[in-house]
Amino acid sequence: MKRRIVLLGPPASGKGTLAELVQNRFAIPATSTGAILRNSIGRHVQDAKEPCPNCGGKLEERDDDNIGALALRMTEFREKTVPVTDFYARRGILARVDANRSVESGFKDVSELIAA
């Protein structure tokens, strides 16, 4: 049986950075549904001029990066993504990784989950 890895988290929690690290280290293809949807509706993401100091990864600026849009995205996360995590948790197939730490610590935890 193939295993699937789904990275869920609120906006700007480092999902893209972690997905890129996993893809590079384990040769696991990564797909960003957010990027697919933004591209399909014509919203563009631009590379920022400076690297992101908190995550160490490439910072991307979205056309809708503002307080109002972030509040909406957080509401959407709570309403639509949290129930998905609950679904996986009830089935015993959810592993949680604390993303409020360094990228290296999060990647170490995810790497151990992949290797298990």
Image (cartoon, rainbow, N blue to C red):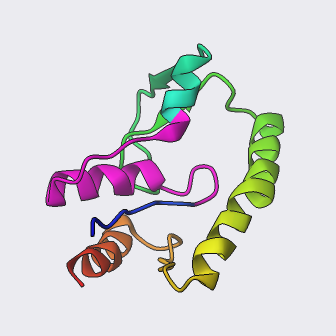
The image position of residue 56, as x and y in percent, is 36, 53
Q: Position of residue 80 (x, y in %)?
A: 74, 55
Classify residue 13 as left or right of residue 107: right
Q: Nearer the viewer, residue 98 or 8?
A: 8
Q: Residue at x 77, y 60 (%)?
A: 78
What residue lies at 31% left-to-right and 67% top-to-bottom?
A: 3
Magenta range: 9-34
Residue in the foreground of this view, choosing between 5 and 11 = 5
| Image side of residue 83 versus residue 62, left or right | right
Q: Residue at x 35, y 53 (%)?
A: 19
Q: Does the magenta portion include 94?
A: no
In this rendering, the answer to whether 38 lies above or below 109 is above
Quadrant housing the C terminus: bottom left
Image point (34%, 79%), residue name: 109
Q: Nearer the viewer, residue 65 or 31?
A: 31
Quadrant position of residue 113: bottom left
For residue 95, side relative to residue 89 (left or right):
left
Expressed as whole percent of the image width and height from the top left, the position of residue 87 reads 65, 73
Considering only vertical position in the picture, is 96 above or below 70? Answer: below
Q: Residue 47 in the image: x percent, y percent? A: 42, 26
